[in-house]
Every structure is written in structure tokens, then in C-alpha cells.
Image: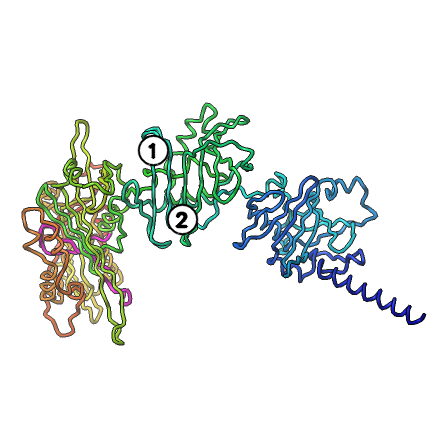
Amino acid sequence: MRKTLLTALLLILALLSVGAAVMLFVDGSLARLTGWYHFRPGMSLFPPENIDRLDEVSWMRISDLHDTVECEKGTDNSWWIVAPFRDRMAPEAAEAILSFTTHARLVDTLPLNRTTRASMREFGVETSPHTITLKRDAGKGEMTTLARFTLGSASPWLADAGDGESLLPTTYVRTNFYGRDKRVHVVSGNILPVFKNGLQGLRDAHPLHFVPETVVDIKITQHQLPQVPSGAADVVHLTRASAQSRWAIVSPTLTEADEEKVETLLTSLTRMRAVRIDDVERVNTPAEPVLTLVLTLENGEKKELRVYNPFTSSSDGQPLCYAKTADRPVVFTLPVEPRMRRSGGYAKLINEILALPVLPANMQAQVQNSLNWVYWVDLPLSLAELRSKHFSHIAQKDIDKVLIRSAFSRQSLVLRLIPGDQEGQVSDVWMFSVDGRPFEEADREVVSSFLNGLSNIPVQGFLHDLKPDESPLDSEREFGLIRPDYLMLIQPRGCTVRAVLFGEDLPLVRDRAPRVFRMKRQRTENKVYWAGMEQNTHSICRLSPKLMKLFSFAPENWRKRNLTHFPISALRTLSLHYMKSPLMLHYDYIGEEWTGTLGTEDITPRINPHRTNYYVHHLQQIRVKRWLPKTDEDALTALKNPVFRVQLQLELTDYSDLEGIVMDASQQGNEINRRTLPSLDEVRDMLTEKNETDAAFRKIATGERKVKKRSETIEIAPSDPTAKKPFFYGRICEDGRLFILSFEDAQSLDGQLLD
């Protein structure tokens, strides 16, 4: 008898142990057996080991008083509703539930003896509950519960976020994870807005999910357009070789794409949300869409969106349209445009204000991304919107040489870059030559303005697009591009790469072909415009007058605007002629000493070396406002009686032999002086140098070199005294160059160098 009782007792203990093990395996806690758990403020509702494994949650159930939805995580980490219907779950909803479960902390627990039936309705855990259960896969087809709780109403309290400054909203919560515990807790956080539209609101309102950077092909097909024959379609096809390459349009014509517009399109498609989602069986859509959008990703996966005829909402009059995707059996109702664009007496005014180019395109895209809704009418989907508006889009850093020939005056302009050395802190220098004259240093700002204008000034429109199989000759003849008024060639920098050959590191240069542009002035009955085309492209453009104003063959427009250029070590004498007796200052660079005379008087003790050094430095920095032609009559008249004269006596190292090498290597002379526009092969010969020009420009003499003396005399005279904004004319006497100097810079030449 005693053995029987002992056996029964052991059996009961074994059953209790097995039950406890099962309960521990399923719920992660034995509190279900005890019916009570000791909660403390600041702790999580669930054990730390469960919280640490919430990233393994693969199944969740969400219930309210009427419905229950079950969701599973797919192989691509996306969440899908699997019961009572199948559809993609809103990723923000799944993220909100998991984040709330992870970060919610206990603020307070309400005593059971103070919770009445009326107060329970106020807490919402019985009248409007949302019960959430989270499980993970335990293997062998078993699931383990990591968390289970019931959301009630929002609590009136605010919880400390932990930083001593921020406050968090709180929510009433009840959990039976530990047993039949009826207590109501106040926890930090609030995800009730996720369920404001009921459990149907858990459906993902975004029709398309993709990473914009991974898209390599876009095909937009617009069906049944009024301007094309019945049944025909307008196809805009964009593609790129890889995610790092630039976009190109390959249909209906071959041309570059507007990178910002394509980025805006892709970003907007990822942000687009539906105002309503219905099962396919509940909505009657037309047989054929009006637009089909197909995106191809790098891995070959395709994303397809079919859009149907727009209609007007019967409730509020907003334009809407239906859309479908290939991977979800639902119909999306998308907003076509905001209601305010179609209603109210000020609708037209609002549309015009919204259309104003107040911000650059990239900033407008940022503002658009900050809005809640993406409207279909705002998406760039047509060829006119997606194509590049640049005539000669090429980055300034990639340009090595530019050659322009004019058929008007038979003039020529050559710009060429002398690369600097970043390690040696030597800056790049641009040189220019007009009509075969010796190269001069060009003004960096003028060249940058010119090159930036070539790339950034948009064309006014497109006169003709060649079809991929169309010969360009007829169109070029129609717009006069067979005999252009301007011929421009841009030589890109060579791509330098390195290779290891037989154990040696060798530099290899892969040259890129020159880009050729032709421009022709066209006259119509009403106006004059410019037509232009890049060789081997498929579009004839209508050029902007702003672009054509950049073309100039006047040397004074390109010349470096520094008034004078000399190293301080070359200065020997500085003379100022603005008094009855000239002030002559002599400089010893080695000893850094100044001596001088005023007329016949020795004024060396009166020279202020700090003022004098600053005056020389300022003279080196002065920039003219504009160089003038040497025949400018107004300047020559004013300079008959100069009011001020500065004279510099310089001793410079003679590098004339190196300059000869450079000029020979630059093909300066015969070819550029020809009186006719050269052929393409001839121009390529001009731009393809056969000697090491860049090395010659940077060559530094290591031995003793000759010294040559040079004098620079600067005269200035005021302009018309009746002018609203007075300025000064100036002249460099040695070569007759004329310039305009601002009133302030002219005054600064009258320096007080003596104490």
C-alpha cells in the first residue's frame, strides 16, 4: 500500500514536471501555473530572453472584437497576411508591433481591487481590445510564443523616455502570458494609430516594393492614346548597364535621360500609397489598362504595375484610378491628383503657384518626398519629362580641350587644360588661343562659367528626334547642320588605368573619342533661333540664347582678369606717379628692405615696410572688371590725360626656350589659321598632340637660367563723371591692353606708403 502511494506521488510529480516543461517551452514562463507575476516599473512585460529573440518572430496573430488576422514572414523578410485572406502586410505595421513589444516598459500597474466594470471600459482592454500574439519557429513544425498582450485605450499619463527631457505616450495593456492575471498595466508607447482603419488597414498600401538603386530597366507603355492610331501604344524605354551607370532612353528615340527625373520617378513609386485596397473579385476594372509600368531589377526580378482609366470619387470628387500588380490579388485605388486642383474658384491660381520653379529640381524632389501622398499626375512618365534637357552634358573635370570654329568670321578658339599636381599643390591652369595667337592663361571663372553653361543650361526644346533606324542626313540638311555656323569639339580627358605586366606596374592610357557638336542659326518669319546637334546622337535641339551668348572669340573675354601677375621675388622698382614728384621705391628681396626717393629727396627712413608690402600684395590681387578691345574709343579718349600711373620694374627668369617647346607641342599655327572650317579628321589631329605638352608646361629648370627685364606701366583715368556709377579706364602701356577698373580698386592704388 505504501509503495502504491509512493508510486502515485512520483507519477503526479512527473506529470507536473512535464506540464511545467511544456508550459515553459510554449510560453517561456511558469507564471501560467501560478497565475501571478511580480511586475516592477521600468521592466519589460516579457522575459529578457524573449525580448532578445524578437527578431526571430515569424508568425503573429492580431485580433479585435470582430476579426482575426494571421501573418507570416516570407523568405525575403517581408510579412504576408495568410488568413482569412492572402495579401502583403504593411511593413510599417509589422515594424511598429515588433518595436512596441521590444521597447515598451512598465510605468504602473493598477490594483485589482480598484478596477470596476466601468473603469475596465475606460481602459479599453475589454470594450475595444487588440490582442497580439508573437511566435517563433522552434523547429520540427513547432512554434514557441515569445509575447502575447492585449492593447487597450491610450493612457492620459506620459512616461520619461530615459534622457530626462523627452516624454512618451502610454497605453493600457493586459497580458495573460503568465496566467490568468487580470491586472491592467500602463506601458510606454502607443501603436493604436496602426489599427485606426481596422484590421483591413494592416494591408500594405504601397503597390510596389523595390530599392531604386537596384533598378536597371524601366518600360512605360501608354495604351490607346488619342494622338496615335487606335490600338497603338507609346513606349518609353529606359535602361542602364548597371546600378552605377547612367540612364539612357532607347525608345522611342536614343538619347540621354534626366537622372534627377528618373530618380524622382523611382523614389515616388516606392512612396506611392493607395487610398483603398479591395480584393479583385469586388472591383470591376476595364479589360485593358491605360498604362503599364515594368521595372527590372539587377537580379532579373520584374515589378509590374497596370493603371486603368481615372474616375472621380462620388463622395468627395477627388480624381482616382485603379491599379493592379502581378504579385498581389488586389485592386489599388490610387490618388490621381489633389482635390484642390479641381475644386474652388482659386484652383487655377493654386495650380500656377505650385508649378512655379521656386526650388531647384533636387530640392523640389526633397519637398515632394516630405509630403504624405504621391499623386499619379505628378509622376514623370513621358519622353518629354524623362529625357535630358542638356545639349552637351559633360562634367568639367572630364574636359581636356575645347575647339570652336565659326563660319561667320572664320575665327577659332582653343581652350586647353594644363593639369596640376595635387600632391605638389599645383593648381590646374586653363590656356586659350584665338586665331592661332600664342597661348595665354585664361581666367578660371570665365572658363568655368563657359563649361558649366555647356553642361547645365537646358535646351529650349527638341526640333526633331531620329528613329533608331532613320538616316540623319535629311534632317541635318533641313536644319542646316550640314554646313554649321559653329563647330565645337570637346576632347575628354584620357582614362588612365594601371596594369601589372611581367611583374612591373605600368600606366596605360585609354583615350576617349572627341565629342563633336554643330550649331546653325535659323530664321523664320517671326523669330531667329539656334538649332544644334551632337554627332552620332538622335536629337536635333532648339538651343537657348543663354547658351549661344557664351560663345566668344574676343581675346579680352577669356584673358585672366588679374591686373598684373609677377612673383614678389622679381620686383625691383615700384614707381607711383600721382604727385608732382614721382615716388620711386626699390626692393631688395633677399634682405626684405625698401629704399626710395621722392623726386631727388631720399625718403628711405619714411617708408613704412608693412604698408608697402601690403600694397604690393594688394596690387597682385586686383582684378579688372572687364578687358576692352585695344580700339575702344571711350577708353582711349579718357586715357589721353591719365590721373595716376604705376610702374613696375621686374627681373624674371627666362623660360622662353620652354615656351617654344610648349607652343610647338600645342599645334599652334598653320592648322588653326586655315580660312575654312576643318574636316573632322583635321580637327582630331589638332586635338591629338604627339608630344608631352603637359610635362613641358610643368618642367622646371634645374640649372642656371638667364634673367630678362620687364617693365609694366599701368595708367588709369576716370570715366564720364556724370555716370550713375563711376569707374576708371585703364591701360597697360607696354602692350596697349585696355581695361575697366572699379572705383574702389582705383582708389586703393593711391596708397599711403610713407609715414
The magenta segment is: 419-444
Left or right: where does residue 477 sit relative to residue 611? Answer: left
Q: Are marks 2 and 1 in contact (CB under 8 Å)?
A: no
Q: What amino acid type is highlighted by mark number 1?
A: Ala
Does label 2 or label 1 sit earlier along the sequence? 1
Overall secondary structure of the magenta stretch? loop
Q: Is residue 731 magenta?
A: no
Residue ID at (16%, 39%) = 476
Which residue, given by chain and number where applicable, does mark 1 sit on? 232
Q: As drawn, which residue projects farthest toward the right?
A: 1
Across and down, in percent, residue 439 comes to 13, 56
Q: Nearer the viewer, residue 571 or 277?
A: 277
| Residue 173 image label | none
Q: What amino acid type is highlighted by mark number 2?
A: Thr
> Quarter holding the N terminus?
bottom right
Relative height, residue 708 to residue 732 (above, below): below
Q: Nearer the viewer, residue 387 or 322?
A: 322
Residue 69 quadrant: top right
Relative height, residue 274 to residue 341 (above, below): below
> Quarter holding the C terminus?
bottom left
Left or right: where does residue 173 sit relative to residue 573? Answer: right
**Mark 1 falls on what kind of element?**
loop
Across and down, in percent, residue 657 comes to 9, 66
| Residue 296 image label | 2
Q: As drawn, which residue projects farthest toward the top?
A: 345
Residue ID at (62%, 39%) = 196
Crowd rating for badge 2 (residues with CA inside 10 Å; few <14, some 14–19, many 20+): some
Q: Is residue 430 magenta?
A: yes
Crowd rating for badge 1 (residues with CA inside 10 Å; few <14, some 14–19, many 20+): few
Q: Is residue 595 something that shows in the picture?
A: no
